[in-house]
Amino acid sequence: MNIILVAINAKFIHSCLAVYSLYAFLDEAEKKHVSIKEFTVNHSEDLIISELFDLKPDVLAFSCYIWNITMVLSLAQTFKKILPETKIVVGGPEVSYESGDLSSYGVDIVVPGEGERAFKALVREFVSREFSSPAWLQDMPGNFGTKKGADFALADTGSFNNNSFATIPLEDIPFPYTGDDAGLHNFGNRIIYYETSRGCPNQCGFCLSSVTRGVRFLPMDRVKSDLSAFLSAKVHQVKFVDRTFNCDKKHAVDIWSYLIENDNGVTNFHFEIGGGLLDDETIRLVGQARKGLFQFEIGVQSTNPDTLTAIRRSVDNQKLFKNIRKLKALGNVHLHLDLIVGLPYEDYPSFIRSFNDVMACFPPKLQVGFLKLLKGSSLRENAAKYGIQFKGQPPYEILSNHYMGFETINKVKKIENMVDMFYNSGGYHCFVKFMCLKFDSPFDFFDALSVYWEQNGYHLLSHKKAALYTILYEFGKRAFPSNAMTISELLKFDMLMKENIRTFPKWIDAYYHYDHKQITRTAGIHIFKYDICGWLRQEEKKFAATLQKKEIKVRFDYTRMDEERYSQL
Protein backbone atom coordinates (compact mmCIF):
# COMPACT_ATOMS: atom_id res chain seq x y z
CA MET A 1 0.00 0.00 0.00
CA ASN A 2 1.41 3.36 -1.05
CA ILE A 3 -0.18 6.33 0.78
CA ILE A 4 1.16 9.85 0.12
CA LEU A 5 0.52 12.75 2.51
CA VAL A 6 0.60 15.87 0.34
CA ALA A 7 1.24 19.40 1.60
CA ILE A 8 1.01 22.42 -0.68
CA ASN A 9 2.49 25.40 1.14
CA ALA A 10 2.16 29.10 0.40
CA LYS A 11 5.94 29.54 0.07
CA PHE A 12 9.03 27.36 -0.05
CA ILE A 13 10.22 28.55 3.36
CA HIS A 14 6.99 27.30 4.95
CA SER A 15 6.36 23.75 6.12
CA CYS A 16 3.16 21.90 6.98
CA LEU A 17 2.82 20.85 10.61
CA ALA A 18 -0.40 18.95 9.82
CA VAL A 19 1.14 16.26 7.63
CA TYR A 20 4.02 15.72 10.05
CA SER A 21 1.60 15.35 12.99
CA LEU A 22 -0.51 12.85 11.03
CA TYR A 23 2.61 10.88 10.14
CA ALA A 24 3.98 10.98 13.70
CA PHE A 25 0.73 9.52 15.09
CA LEU A 26 1.16 6.34 13.05
CA ASP A 27 2.99 3.33 14.45
CA GLU A 28 6.11 2.01 12.73
CA ALA A 29 4.25 -0.67 10.78
CA GLU A 30 1.78 1.91 9.45
CA LYS A 31 4.53 4.35 8.52
CA LYS A 32 5.94 1.79 6.09
CA HIS A 33 2.93 2.49 3.88
CA VAL A 34 2.99 6.30 4.18
CA SER A 35 5.33 9.04 2.92
CA ILE A 36 5.25 12.86 2.81
CA LYS A 37 5.58 15.13 -0.21
CA GLU A 38 5.65 18.93 0.09
CA PHE A 39 5.11 21.43 -2.73
CA THR A 40 4.15 25.10 -2.94
CA VAL A 41 1.38 26.99 -4.74
CA ASN A 42 4.15 28.41 -6.96
CA HIS A 43 4.88 24.99 -8.43
CA SER A 44 3.04 24.26 -11.63
CA GLU A 45 0.21 21.75 -11.45
CA ASP A 46 1.89 19.78 -14.23
CA LEU A 47 5.03 19.40 -12.13
CA ILE A 48 3.09 18.27 -9.06
CA ILE A 49 1.02 15.80 -11.09
CA SER A 50 4.19 14.41 -12.68
CA GLU A 51 5.93 14.01 -9.32
CA LEU A 52 2.96 12.27 -7.74
CA PHE A 53 2.24 10.10 -10.79
CA ASP A 54 5.77 8.71 -10.70
CA LEU A 55 5.10 7.50 -7.14
CA LYS A 56 2.06 5.46 -8.31
CA PRO A 57 0.08 6.13 -5.13
CA ASP A 58 -2.86 4.04 -3.95
CA VAL A 59 -3.99 6.94 -1.77
CA LEU A 60 -3.35 10.69 -1.98
CA ALA A 61 -4.20 12.61 1.20
CA PHE A 62 -4.20 16.43 0.89
CA SER A 63 -4.04 18.97 3.73
CA CYS A 64 -6.42 21.80 2.73
CA TYR A 65 -6.26 25.52 3.58
CA ILE A 66 -7.51 28.72 1.99
CA TRP A 67 -4.23 29.27 0.16
CA ASN A 68 -4.20 25.85 -1.53
CA ILE A 69 -7.77 24.49 -1.76
CA THR A 70 -8.30 25.65 -5.35
CA MET A 71 -5.10 23.94 -6.47
CA VAL A 72 -5.84 20.81 -4.40
CA LEU A 73 -9.24 20.30 -6.01
CA SER A 74 -7.82 20.88 -9.47
CA LEU A 75 -5.04 18.36 -8.79
CA ALA A 76 -7.51 15.83 -7.41
CA GLN A 77 -9.75 16.16 -10.44
CA THR A 78 -6.84 15.75 -12.85
CA PHE A 79 -5.25 12.88 -10.96
CA LYS A 80 -8.52 10.95 -10.87
CA LYS A 81 -8.54 11.01 -14.67
CA ILE A 82 -5.04 9.61 -15.08
CA LEU A 83 -5.09 7.15 -12.15
CA PRO A 84 -8.79 6.58 -11.43
CA GLU A 85 -8.08 3.77 -8.98
CA THR A 86 -6.20 6.14 -6.63
CA LYS A 87 -8.19 7.07 -3.55
CA ILE A 88 -8.33 10.86 -2.89
CA VAL A 89 -8.61 11.99 0.76
CA VAL A 90 -8.88 15.61 1.91
CA GLY A 91 -8.76 17.12 5.38
CA GLY A 92 -8.01 20.39 7.14
CA PRO A 93 -9.93 23.57 7.98
CA GLU A 94 -11.01 24.33 4.42
CA VAL A 95 -13.06 21.12 4.19
CA SER A 96 -14.06 20.71 7.83
CA TYR A 97 -16.99 23.11 7.99
CA GLU A 98 -18.62 23.48 4.57
CA SER A 99 -17.11 20.80 2.38
CA GLY A 100 -20.19 20.11 0.28
CA ASP A 101 -20.14 17.35 -2.32
CA LEU A 102 -16.57 17.11 -3.58
CA SER A 103 -17.03 13.91 -5.56
CA SER A 104 -17.09 15.89 -8.83
CA TYR A 105 -13.47 16.81 -8.10
CA GLY A 106 -12.51 13.18 -7.64
CA VAL A 107 -12.52 13.36 -3.83
CA ASP A 108 -13.44 10.06 -2.18
CA ILE A 109 -13.11 10.84 1.52
CA VAL A 110 -13.29 14.00 3.64
CA VAL A 111 -11.77 14.00 7.12
CA PRO A 112 -13.06 16.98 9.14
CA GLY A 113 -11.63 18.37 12.37
CA GLU A 114 -8.50 17.04 14.04
CA GLY A 115 -7.21 14.34 11.78
CA GLU A 116 -4.61 12.28 13.64
CA ARG A 117 -6.90 9.56 14.95
CA ALA A 118 -9.07 9.45 11.83
CA PHE A 119 -6.11 9.26 9.46
CA LYS A 120 -4.60 6.42 11.50
CA ALA A 121 -7.89 4.53 11.21
CA LEU A 122 -7.96 5.21 7.49
CA VAL A 123 -4.45 3.86 7.01
CA ARG A 124 -5.42 0.68 8.85
CA GLU A 125 -8.56 0.39 6.73
CA PHE A 126 -6.68 0.83 3.47
CA VAL A 127 -3.90 -1.58 4.42
CA SER A 128 -6.25 -4.30 5.64
CA ARG A 129 -8.49 -4.02 2.57
CA GLU A 130 -5.54 -4.17 0.21
CA PHE A 131 -4.38 -7.46 1.67
CA SER A 132 -7.84 -8.96 2.14
CA SER A 133 -9.31 -8.20 -1.27
CA PRO A 134 -7.90 -7.03 -4.61
CA ALA A 135 -11.10 -5.03 -5.08
CA TRP A 136 -10.63 -3.01 -1.90
CA LEU A 137 -11.38 0.28 -3.64
CA GLN A 138 -14.74 -0.84 -4.98
CA ASP A 139 -15.65 -2.30 -1.59
CA MET A 140 -15.47 1.08 0.14
CA PRO A 141 -19.08 1.74 1.22
CA GLY A 142 -19.30 5.49 0.69
CA ASN A 143 -17.84 8.63 -0.87
CA PHE A 144 -17.21 10.69 2.23
CA GLY A 145 -15.82 10.17 5.69
CA THR A 146 -16.60 11.64 9.07
CA LYS A 147 -15.50 11.01 12.61
CA LYS A 148 -17.97 9.75 15.21
CA GLY A 149 -16.50 9.92 18.67
CA ALA A 150 -13.07 8.35 18.69
CA ASP A 151 -13.58 6.25 15.58
CA PHE A 152 -13.56 6.83 11.87
CA ALA A 153 -16.69 5.83 9.96
CA LEU A 154 -17.66 6.13 6.32
CA ALA A 155 -20.88 7.89 5.40
CA ASP A 156 -22.83 8.92 2.32
CA THR A 157 -22.82 12.63 3.11
CA GLY A 158 -20.33 15.45 2.99
CA SER A 159 -22.17 17.46 5.64
CA PHE A 160 -20.66 17.44 9.12
CA ASN A 161 -21.66 18.55 12.60
CA ASN A 162 -18.83 20.74 13.90
CA ASN A 163 -19.64 19.87 17.51
CA SER A 164 -19.04 16.18 16.87
CA PHE A 165 -15.34 16.59 16.11
CA ALA A 166 -13.40 14.38 18.48
CA THR A 167 -10.32 15.87 20.13
CA ILE A 168 -7.17 14.12 21.18
CA PRO A 169 -4.77 14.69 24.10
CA LEU A 170 -1.80 16.52 22.61
CA GLU A 171 0.66 14.33 24.50
CA ASP A 172 -0.62 11.35 22.49
CA ILE A 173 0.90 12.89 19.35
CA PRO A 174 4.66 12.19 19.23
CA PHE A 175 7.15 14.93 18.36
CA PRO A 176 6.44 15.50 14.64
CA TYR A 177 10.01 16.03 13.44
CA THR A 178 11.85 12.72 13.83
CA GLY A 179 13.09 9.98 11.55
CA ASP A 180 14.64 10.01 8.09
CA ASP A 181 11.55 11.40 6.35
CA ALA A 182 10.51 13.99 8.95
CA GLY A 183 13.73 14.80 10.81
CA LEU A 184 14.87 18.36 11.43
CA HIS A 185 17.78 17.87 9.01
CA ASN A 186 15.23 18.06 6.17
CA PHE A 187 14.21 21.66 6.82
CA GLY A 188 17.31 23.76 6.14
CA ASN A 189 16.39 27.43 6.55
CA ARG A 190 12.66 26.82 6.32
CA ILE A 191 10.20 27.87 9.03
CA ILE A 192 9.26 25.01 11.33
CA TYR A 193 5.74 25.17 12.78
CA TYR A 194 5.06 23.84 16.26
CA GLU A 195 2.18 23.78 18.74
CA THR A 196 2.02 23.51 22.51
CA SER A 197 -1.74 24.08 22.71
CA ARG A 198 -4.92 23.72 20.71
CA GLY A 199 -7.92 25.98 21.09
CA CYS A 200 -8.19 29.61 22.17
CA PRO A 201 -9.83 31.35 25.15
CA ASN A 202 -11.08 34.09 22.81
CA GLN A 203 -14.09 33.72 20.53
CA CYS A 204 -13.18 36.25 17.84
CA GLY A 205 -15.78 36.28 15.08
CA PHE A 206 -13.27 36.20 12.21
CA CYS A 207 -11.28 33.22 13.51
CA LEU A 208 -11.88 29.48 13.24
CA SER A 209 -10.79 29.07 16.86
CA SER A 210 -14.18 30.57 17.77
CA VAL A 211 -15.92 27.29 16.88
CA THR A 212 -14.08 25.30 19.55
CA ARG A 213 -14.27 25.60 23.31
CA GLY A 214 -11.42 25.50 25.77
CA VAL A 215 -7.67 25.18 25.43
CA ARG A 216 -5.63 21.97 25.70
CA PHE A 217 -1.93 22.21 26.56
CA LEU A 218 1.01 19.93 25.93
CA PRO A 219 2.65 18.88 29.25
CA MET A 220 5.68 21.02 30.07
CA ASP A 221 8.16 18.16 30.28
CA ARG A 222 7.22 17.15 26.75
CA VAL A 223 7.44 20.79 25.55
CA LYS A 224 10.95 21.17 26.94
CA SER A 225 12.01 17.92 25.29
CA ASP A 226 10.71 19.15 21.93
CA LEU A 227 12.35 22.56 22.32
CA SER A 228 15.64 20.88 23.18
CA ALA A 229 15.51 19.11 19.81
CA PHE A 230 15.05 22.43 17.99
CA LEU A 231 17.86 24.06 19.94
CA SER A 232 20.25 21.16 19.42
CA ALA A 233 19.59 21.17 15.67
CA LYS A 234 20.07 24.98 15.56
CA VAL A 235 17.10 25.41 13.25
CA HIS A 236 16.55 28.89 11.79
CA GLN A 237 13.04 29.68 13.06
CA VAL A 238 10.32 27.93 15.04
CA LYS A 239 6.87 29.46 14.67
CA PHE A 240 4.40 28.56 17.39
CA VAL A 241 0.88 28.15 16.00
CA ASP A 242 -0.75 28.46 19.44
CA ARG A 243 -3.60 30.93 18.94
CA THR A 244 -3.01 33.05 22.05
CA PHE A 245 0.29 31.71 23.32
CA ASN A 246 0.27 33.51 26.67
CA CYS A 247 -3.37 32.84 27.60
CA ASP A 248 -1.93 30.76 30.45
CA LYS A 249 0.78 32.87 32.08
CA LYS A 250 2.62 29.99 33.75
CA HIS A 251 2.72 27.97 30.53
CA ALA A 252 4.17 30.93 28.61
CA VAL A 253 6.64 31.96 31.33
CA ASP A 254 7.96 28.41 31.71
CA ILE A 255 8.63 28.18 27.97
CA TRP A 256 10.17 31.65 27.66
CA SER A 257 12.38 31.00 30.70
CA TYR A 258 13.56 27.69 29.26
CA LEU A 259 14.43 29.27 25.92
CA ILE A 260 16.30 32.15 27.56
CA GLU A 261 18.29 29.75 29.73
CA ASN A 262 19.08 27.37 26.85
CA ASP A 263 19.48 29.86 24.00
CA ASN A 264 21.76 28.50 21.25
CA GLY A 265 22.44 31.96 19.84
CA VAL A 266 20.87 31.08 16.50
CA THR A 267 17.24 30.01 16.62
CA ASN A 268 14.39 32.53 16.53
CA PHE A 269 11.01 31.70 18.11
CA HIS A 270 7.83 33.38 16.87
CA PHE A 271 4.75 33.66 19.13
CA GLU A 272 1.26 35.05 18.57
CA ILE A 273 0.45 36.65 21.91
CA GLY A 274 -2.26 38.66 23.61
CA GLY A 275 -0.52 41.97 24.31
CA GLY A 276 -3.04 42.98 26.95
CA LEU A 277 -2.34 39.80 28.94
CA LEU A 278 1.26 40.77 29.69
CA ASP A 279 2.27 42.14 33.07
CA ASP A 280 5.43 43.85 34.28
CA GLU A 281 6.90 40.60 35.65
CA THR A 282 6.55 38.86 32.29
CA ILE A 283 7.91 41.84 30.38
CA ARG A 284 10.98 41.93 32.63
CA LEU A 285 11.54 38.23 31.89
CA VAL A 286 11.29 38.83 28.14
CA GLY A 287 13.79 41.66 28.55
CA GLN A 288 16.43 39.08 29.54
CA ALA A 289 16.26 37.36 26.14
CA ARG A 290 18.96 37.65 23.51
CA LYS A 291 18.09 40.13 20.81
CA GLY A 292 16.52 38.10 18.05
CA LEU A 293 15.51 35.16 20.23
CA PHE A 294 11.82 36.16 20.35
CA GLN A 295 9.43 37.55 17.79
CA PHE A 296 5.94 38.57 18.94
CA GLU A 297 2.86 39.01 16.77
CA ILE A 298 0.06 40.97 18.43
CA GLY A 299 -3.36 41.17 16.80
CA VAL A 300 -4.74 44.62 17.54
CA GLN A 301 -7.30 44.26 14.69
CA SER A 302 -9.13 47.50 15.62
CA THR A 303 -9.24 50.08 18.40
CA ASN A 304 -12.95 50.82 17.89
CA PRO A 305 -14.83 49.64 21.04
CA ASP A 306 -18.02 48.86 19.09
CA THR A 307 -16.04 46.80 16.60
CA LEU A 308 -14.26 44.85 19.33
CA THR A 309 -17.59 44.10 21.01
CA ALA A 310 -19.15 42.95 17.73
CA ILE A 311 -16.33 40.46 17.09
CA ARG A 312 -16.39 39.29 20.72
CA ARG A 313 -12.91 40.54 21.46
CA SER A 314 -12.34 41.84 24.98
CA VAL A 315 -9.39 44.25 24.97
CA ASP A 316 -8.21 47.06 27.24
CA ASN A 317 -6.62 49.27 24.57
CA GLN A 318 -4.87 51.50 27.10
CA LYS A 319 -3.16 48.52 28.72
CA LEU A 320 -2.46 46.92 25.35
CA PHE A 321 -0.57 49.92 23.95
CA LYS A 322 1.20 50.51 27.23
CA ASN A 323 2.55 46.96 27.06
CA ILE A 324 3.45 47.30 23.39
CA ARG A 325 5.54 50.38 24.18
CA LYS A 326 7.25 48.56 27.04
CA LEU A 327 8.11 45.66 24.75
CA LYS A 328 9.44 48.00 22.11
CA ALA A 329 11.53 49.86 24.69
CA LEU A 330 13.27 46.59 25.57
CA GLY A 331 14.85 46.68 22.12
CA ASN A 332 15.32 42.91 21.93
CA VAL A 333 11.96 41.68 20.61
CA HIS A 334 10.81 42.05 17.00
CA LEU A 335 7.15 43.12 17.05
CA HIS A 336 4.46 42.52 14.43
CA LEU A 337 1.15 44.33 14.96
CA ASP A 338 -1.95 43.41 12.96
CA LEU A 339 -5.02 45.35 11.82
CA ILE A 340 -8.02 43.95 9.94
CA VAL A 341 -9.93 46.01 7.37
CA GLY A 342 -13.67 45.32 6.97
CA LEU A 343 -14.77 44.50 10.51
CA PRO A 344 -18.28 45.51 11.69
CA TYR A 345 -18.71 49.18 12.67
CA GLU A 346 -15.22 50.06 11.39
CA ASP A 347 -15.93 52.77 8.82
CA TYR A 348 -13.20 54.76 7.06
CA PRO A 349 -12.71 57.42 9.80
CA SER A 350 -12.69 54.66 12.41
CA PHE A 351 -10.05 52.69 10.50
CA ILE A 352 -7.90 55.81 10.19
CA ARG A 353 -8.02 56.17 13.98
CA SER A 354 -7.10 52.51 14.47
CA PHE A 355 -4.22 52.85 12.00
CA ASN A 356 -2.84 55.97 13.67
CA ASP A 357 -3.25 54.43 17.13
CA VAL A 358 -1.02 51.54 16.08
CA MET A 359 1.47 53.66 14.13
CA ALA A 360 1.94 55.92 17.15
CA CYS A 361 4.05 53.03 18.49
CA PHE A 362 6.13 52.83 15.28
CA PRO A 363 6.13 49.02 15.41
CA PRO A 364 8.84 47.24 13.39
CA LYS A 365 6.10 45.71 11.24
CA LEU A 366 2.44 46.60 10.71
CA GLN A 367 0.37 44.06 8.81
CA VAL A 368 -2.82 45.53 7.38
CA GLY A 369 -4.98 42.55 6.47
CA PHE A 370 -8.41 42.40 4.86
CA LEU A 371 -11.20 40.45 6.47
CA LYS A 372 -11.54 36.89 5.19
CA LEU A 373 -14.87 35.17 5.73
CA LEU A 374 -13.52 31.78 6.73
CA LYS A 375 -15.76 28.74 6.59
CA GLY A 376 -17.04 28.01 10.07
CA SER A 377 -16.42 31.51 11.45
CA SER A 378 -19.26 33.40 13.12
CA LEU A 379 -18.75 36.46 10.89
CA ARG A 380 -19.38 34.31 7.83
CA GLU A 381 -22.56 33.00 9.43
CA ASN A 382 -23.64 36.59 10.24
CA ALA A 383 -22.45 38.21 7.00
CA ALA A 384 -25.95 39.39 6.08
CA LYS A 385 -26.34 41.18 9.42
CA TYR A 386 -23.41 43.45 8.59
CA GLY A 387 -24.03 43.61 4.85
CA ILE A 388 -20.77 41.81 4.14
CA GLN A 389 -20.12 40.92 0.51
CA PHE A 390 -17.10 38.71 -0.08
CA LYS A 391 -15.40 36.77 -2.84
CA GLY A 392 -16.88 33.36 -3.45
CA GLN A 393 -13.47 31.76 -3.98
CA PRO A 394 -10.66 31.38 -1.44
CA PRO A 395 -9.49 33.31 0.48
CA TYR A 396 -13.08 34.71 0.68
CA GLU A 397 -11.86 38.28 1.07
CA ILE A 398 -14.29 41.07 1.86
CA LEU A 399 -15.58 43.28 -0.98
CA SER A 400 -17.82 45.62 0.99
CA ASN A 401 -20.07 45.92 4.04
CA HIS A 402 -22.48 48.43 5.61
CA TYR A 403 -19.52 50.54 6.81
CA MET A 404 -17.09 50.48 3.88
CA GLY A 405 -18.03 50.29 0.22
CA PHE A 406 -15.79 48.62 -2.34
CA GLU A 407 -14.35 51.99 -3.40
CA THR A 408 -13.15 52.66 0.15
CA ILE A 409 -11.76 49.17 0.67
CA ASN A 410 -9.96 49.43 -2.67
CA LYS A 411 -8.45 52.75 -1.57
CA VAL A 412 -7.21 51.16 1.66
CA LYS A 413 -5.65 48.34 -0.40
CA LYS A 414 -3.53 50.91 -2.24
CA ILE A 415 -2.46 52.45 1.06
CA GLU A 416 -1.65 49.00 2.45
CA ASN A 417 0.61 48.41 -0.55
CA MET A 418 2.63 51.50 0.39
CA VAL A 419 2.84 50.37 4.02
CA ASP A 420 4.12 46.98 2.98
CA MET A 421 6.55 48.28 0.36
CA PHE A 422 8.09 51.17 2.26
CA TYR A 423 7.44 50.48 5.95
CA ASN A 424 7.48 46.72 6.47
CA SER A 425 10.38 46.19 4.08
CA GLY A 426 12.62 48.06 6.54
CA GLY A 427 14.73 49.85 3.95
CA TYR A 428 13.29 53.33 4.38
CA HIS A 429 13.10 53.74 8.14
CA CYS A 430 14.37 57.31 8.54
CA PHE A 431 12.43 58.69 5.60
CA VAL A 432 9.14 57.06 6.62
CA LYS A 433 9.43 58.11 10.25
CA PHE A 434 10.22 61.69 9.25
CA MET A 435 7.24 61.78 6.88
CA CYS A 436 4.88 60.28 9.45
CA LEU A 437 5.84 63.12 11.78
CA LYS A 438 5.79 65.79 9.10
CA PHE A 439 2.30 64.99 7.83
CA ASP A 440 -0.70 65.51 10.10
CA SER A 441 -0.72 61.77 10.81
CA PRO A 442 0.99 58.57 9.60
CA PHE A 443 -2.16 57.64 7.70
CA ASP A 444 -2.13 60.98 5.86
CA PHE A 445 1.43 60.28 4.73
CA PHE A 446 0.71 56.79 3.36
CA ASP A 447 -2.51 58.04 1.80
CA ALA A 448 -0.69 60.89 0.00
CA LEU A 449 2.09 58.53 -1.09
CA SER A 450 -0.43 56.05 -2.52
CA VAL A 451 -2.11 58.82 -4.54
CA TYR A 452 1.26 60.07 -5.84
CA TRP A 453 2.30 56.49 -6.67
CA GLU A 454 -0.79 55.85 -8.78
CA GLN A 455 -0.96 59.28 -10.40
CA ASN A 456 2.52 58.71 -11.79
CA GLY A 457 1.73 55.20 -12.98
CA TYR A 458 4.32 53.61 -10.70
CA HIS A 459 1.84 50.84 -9.78
CA LEU A 460 2.05 49.59 -13.38
CA LEU A 461 5.85 49.20 -13.43
CA SER A 462 8.55 47.18 -11.70
CA HIS A 463 11.26 49.22 -10.00
CA LYS A 464 14.90 48.74 -9.07
CA LYS A 465 15.94 49.67 -5.53
CA ALA A 466 17.73 52.85 -6.59
CA ALA A 467 14.65 54.03 -8.48
CA LEU A 468 12.47 53.61 -5.40
CA TYR A 469 14.70 55.96 -3.39
CA THR A 470 14.47 58.51 -6.19
CA ILE A 471 10.69 58.24 -6.26
CA LEU A 472 10.54 58.83 -2.51
CA TYR A 473 12.86 61.81 -2.80
CA GLU A 474 10.72 63.38 -5.51
CA PHE A 475 7.58 62.77 -3.47
CA GLY A 476 9.10 64.23 -0.30
CA LYS A 477 10.53 67.27 -2.12
CA ARG A 478 7.17 67.93 -3.71
CA ALA A 479 5.31 67.65 -0.38
CA PHE A 480 7.82 69.72 1.62
CA PRO A 481 10.11 71.73 -0.71
CA SER A 482 11.89 73.49 2.14
CA ASN A 483 12.99 70.12 3.57
CA ALA A 484 14.54 68.78 0.36
CA MET A 485 18.07 68.64 1.81
CA THR A 486 16.88 66.93 5.00
CA ILE A 487 14.96 64.36 2.96
CA SER A 488 18.01 63.74 0.79
CA GLU A 489 20.16 63.10 3.88
CA LEU A 490 17.62 60.76 5.44
CA LEU A 491 17.33 58.70 2.27
CA LYS A 492 21.12 58.60 2.00
CA PHE A 493 21.24 57.23 5.55
CA ASP A 494 18.57 54.63 4.70
CA MET A 495 20.47 53.52 1.61
CA LEU A 496 23.69 53.09 3.57
CA MET A 497 21.90 51.14 6.29
CA LYS A 498 20.73 48.73 3.61
CA GLU A 499 24.00 48.20 1.76
CA ASN A 500 27.46 49.62 1.08
CA ILE A 501 26.57 52.13 -1.63
CA ARG A 502 29.46 53.34 -3.81
CA THR A 503 27.52 55.33 -6.41
CA PHE A 504 24.73 57.61 -5.21
CA PRO A 505 21.91 59.16 -7.22
CA LYS A 506 22.67 62.71 -8.38
CA TRP A 507 20.24 64.23 -5.88
CA ILE A 508 22.39 63.01 -2.97
CA ASP A 509 25.32 65.26 -2.09
CA ALA A 510 27.75 62.54 -1.02
CA TYR A 511 31.18 63.40 0.40
CA TYR A 512 34.16 61.14 0.72
CA HIS A 513 36.77 62.98 2.83
CA TYR A 514 38.56 59.74 3.65
CA ASP A 515 41.17 57.68 1.91
CA HIS A 516 39.67 54.82 -0.12
CA LYS A 517 41.57 52.36 2.08
CA GLN A 518 39.14 53.31 4.82
CA ILE A 519 36.17 52.33 2.69
CA THR A 520 36.21 48.57 2.34
CA ARG A 521 33.67 45.98 1.43
CA THR A 522 32.59 45.68 5.04
CA ALA A 523 32.63 49.31 6.16
CA GLY A 524 31.98 52.80 4.92
CA ILE A 525 32.46 56.26 6.48
CA HIS A 526 30.10 59.01 5.41
CA ILE A 527 29.35 62.61 6.33
CA PHE A 528 25.84 63.95 6.97
CA LYS A 529 24.72 67.54 7.33
CA TYR A 530 22.11 66.63 9.96
CA ASP A 531 22.43 64.85 13.29
CA ILE A 532 20.45 61.79 12.23
CA CYS A 533 22.13 59.60 14.84
CA GLY A 534 21.04 61.92 17.62
CA TRP A 535 17.54 62.02 16.18
CA LEU A 536 17.33 58.21 16.12
CA ARG A 537 18.60 57.99 19.71
CA GLN A 538 15.77 60.12 21.05
CA GLU A 539 12.94 58.52 22.94
CA GLU A 540 9.84 58.07 20.83
CA LYS A 541 7.81 60.67 22.67
CA LYS A 542 10.50 63.30 21.99
CA PHE A 543 10.63 62.67 18.24
CA ALA A 544 10.07 65.76 16.14
CA ALA A 545 9.69 66.36 12.43
CA THR A 546 12.83 68.52 12.40
CA LEU A 547 16.44 67.51 12.79
CA GLN A 548 19.34 69.49 14.20
CA LYS A 549 21.57 70.80 11.43
CA LYS A 550 24.93 69.52 12.59
CA GLU A 551 27.61 67.80 10.53
CA ILE A 552 28.33 64.28 11.74
CA LYS A 553 30.54 61.41 10.59
CA VAL A 554 28.99 57.94 10.58
CA ARG A 555 30.61 54.56 10.09
CA PHE A 556 28.49 51.78 8.61
CA ASP A 557 29.57 48.24 9.47
CA TYR A 558 28.20 45.77 6.92
CA THR A 559 29.17 42.76 9.01
CA ARG A 560 26.17 43.69 11.20
CA MET A 561 22.59 42.95 10.20
CA ASP A 562 20.74 45.00 12.84
CA GLU A 563 20.21 48.57 14.02
CA GLU A 564 23.76 48.63 15.37
CA ARG A 565 25.12 48.66 11.83
CA TYR A 566 25.85 52.38 12.21
CA SER A 567 27.99 54.25 14.76
CA GLN A 568 28.79 57.94 15.02
CA LEU A 569 32.48 58.82 14.91
Image: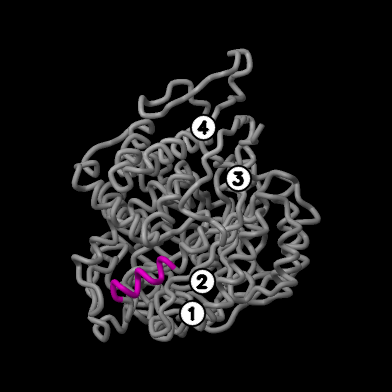
Q: Is residue 140 visible?
A: no
The circle drawn on residue 165 is 1
Which is nearer the N-term, disc 2 or disc 3? 2
**Which quarter of the rendered picture does the C terminus lie within?**
top right
The segment highlighted magenta reads: 347-356
Residue 63, given in percent of the width and then of the height, sits at 43, 59
Magenta stretch holds residue 244? no
The circle drawn on residue 496 is 4
Q: Could you tell me which secondary element the residue under label 3 belongs to?
A: helix
Circles 1 and 2 in contact, beta carbons < 8 Å: yes
Which is nearer the N-term, disc 4 or disc 1? 1
Q: Could you tell me which secondary element the residue under label 2 belongs to?
A: loop
Image quadrant in which you'd find residue 112: bottom left
The CA span between labels 3 and 1 is: 58 Å
The circle drawn on residue 5 is none
The CA span between labels 4 and 1 is: 55 Å
* Front disc: 3 or 4: 3
Provide the residue designation for mark 3. Answer: 534
Circles 2 and 3 in contact, beta carbons < 8 Å: no
Provide the residue designation for mark 2. Answer: 114
* Amino acid under disc 2: Glu
Magenta stretch holds residue 352? yes
Q: Residue at x 24, y 37 (%)?
A: 461
Q: Is residue 379 above or below residue 428?
A: below
Image quadrant in which you'd find residue 551: top right
* Amino acid under disc 1: Phe
Q: Is residue 61 visible?
A: yes
Q: Residues within 10 Å of mark 2 (few under 14, many from 20)?
A: some
Q: Of 29 and 261, which appears nearest the observer?
A: 261
